[in-house]
Image (cartoon, rainbow, N blue to C red):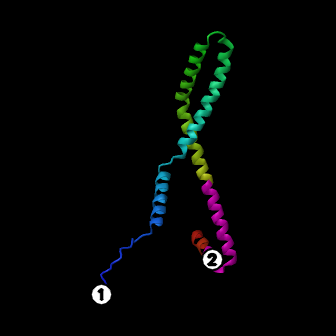
Amino acid sequence: MTSFIQPNYPAQHLGVARIESAVDAVRRMRRGFDSTKGLSAMLLAAMVSALIVVAEQLIDTWADGHLMLAWIALWLIGFAALAVFAGAARKLAVTAVSALDAWSERVGQARADARLWAIAKSDPRVMADLVAAKARNEH
């Protein structure tokens, strides 16, 4: 007896497809993320706000009745500080991020070496491989 019923089931689970698309979206967002931009913006904001506080203290002493002039001077100082410190903040952020990346890589390599050495202490085959590799490097 032949059956004419041909059920049409999806080849992939819909929940799995949604999770995979969400993971892909997060990966795409992470690829476009530059950690130095946020850090440089924060450094720039800190530099400019410190300069504006100092300028406000100075302007406050001589702007007794000239509040509009004082506000204009304060805004001019703020925008000039943004223009002057933008490059320095970006350079400082790039330097800080690269230093942190190098430090993280050194720490990770040290941990990996420690794990390999702990395994080599308990497994004579791994220790023999390490001794052979060291002997090859010495010759």
Q: Residues within 10 Å of mark 2 (few under 14, many from 20)?
A: some
The amino acid type, in three-letter code, at marker 2 is: Val
User: Residue 46, located in which quarter of the rendered image?
Assistant: top right
Q: Residues within 10 Å of mark 1 (few under 14, many from 20)?
A: few
- Disc 2 to disc 1, C-alpha distance: 62 Å
The N terminus lies in which quarter of the figure?
A: bottom left
The amino acid type, in three-letter code, at marker 1 is: Thr
User: Residue 4, located in which quarter of the rendered image?
Assistant: bottom left
Q: Which residue is mark 1?
A: 2
* Residue in the foreground of this view, choosing between 17 and 50: 17
Looking at the image, residue 54 lies above or below residue 6: above
Q: Which residue is mark 2?
A: 126
Q: Position of residue 113 (x, y in %)?
A: 64, 66
Badge 2 element: helix
* Residue 15 relative to residue 63: left or right: left
Find out whether residue 120 is within the magenta segment.
Answer: yes
Q: Earlier in the sequence, mark 2 or mark 1?
A: 1
Seen at 65% across and 12% down, the residue is: 63
Find out whether residue 37 is within the magenta segment.
Answer: no
Please report the bounds of the magenta region as a residue range.
104-131
* Residue 123 relative to residue 25: left or right: right
Seen at 47% across and 49% down, the residue is: 32
The C terminus lies in which quarter of the figure?
A: bottom right
